[in-house]
Image (cartoon, rainbow, N blue to C red):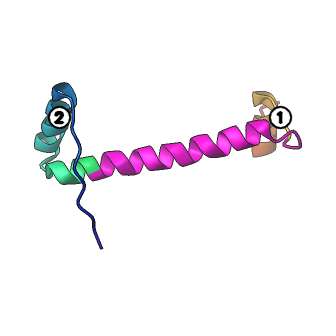
Amino acid sequence: MSHVISTRLKENLYSALERIADTRQRSFSEIVQDALQCYVEDYADYKIAVDRLHDHTDEIIDSSELERRLGWHKG
């Protein structure tokens, strides 16, 4: 199922999306859908990060500890 939406875009954003669609040989609608999907995924990642930041029980480690835990530590 799909839904139709209507929105106003500033000229520079509209032109940029048109150029991307032309370059990728895809429809304008596909490019807008891809962009919105990326935004939704990025927002979900952001929300997780903020939630973890405010969770005082969530352990904070530095990059060297992260590398050690991932087995990337040399030495």
Q: Is residue 5 above or below residue 12?
A: below
Tell which of 60 and 54 is nearer to you: 54
Does the residue at mark 1 contact the one at mark 2 (Cβ under 8 Å)?
no
Mark 2: which amino acid? Tyr
Residue 37 point in image, percent of width and height: 39, 51
Amino acid type for the residue under numbered disc 1: Ile
Apparent side of residue 19 relative to residue 5 in the rendered image (left or right):
left
Please indicate whether residue 42 sits to the left or right of residue 7 in the image. Answer: right
The nearer-to-camera label among 1 and 2 is 2
Residue drawn at x 50%, y 43% as measured from the top left: 42
Q: How far across and how far down the image is residue 67, in percent?
A: 75, 36
Mark 2 neighbour density, 10 Å: few (under 14) some (14–19) many (20 or more): some
Image quadrant occupied by the C terminus: top right
Q: Is residue 51 visible?
A: yes
Q: Answer with mark 1 or mark 2, whichever residue precedes in sequence.
A: 2
Q: Is residue 71 visible?
A: no
Using the rendered view, name the quadrant where residue 7 is placed. top left
> Residue 30 — which label?
none
Residue drawn where x is 62% and y is 44% of the image? 47
Q: Residue at x 72, y 43 (%)?
A: 51
Instruction: Please report the bounds of the magenta region as a residue range.
Output: 33-58
- For residue 56: magenta? yes
Circle 1 Cα neighbour tier, 10 Å, few/some/many (<14 / 14–19 / ≥20): few
Please name the residue that numbered disc 1 is placed on: 60
The spot of residue 73 in percent (x, y) is 78, 34
Q: Which residue is depicted at the point 33% across and 45% down?
A: 35
Q: Which residue is mark 2?
A: 14
Residue extending farthest right: 57
- Dot 2 falls on a residue whose secondary structure is helix
Left or right of residue 18: residue 49 = right
Q: Is residue 41 magenta?
A: yes
Separation of marks 1 and 2 at Cα, in angstroms:
42 Å
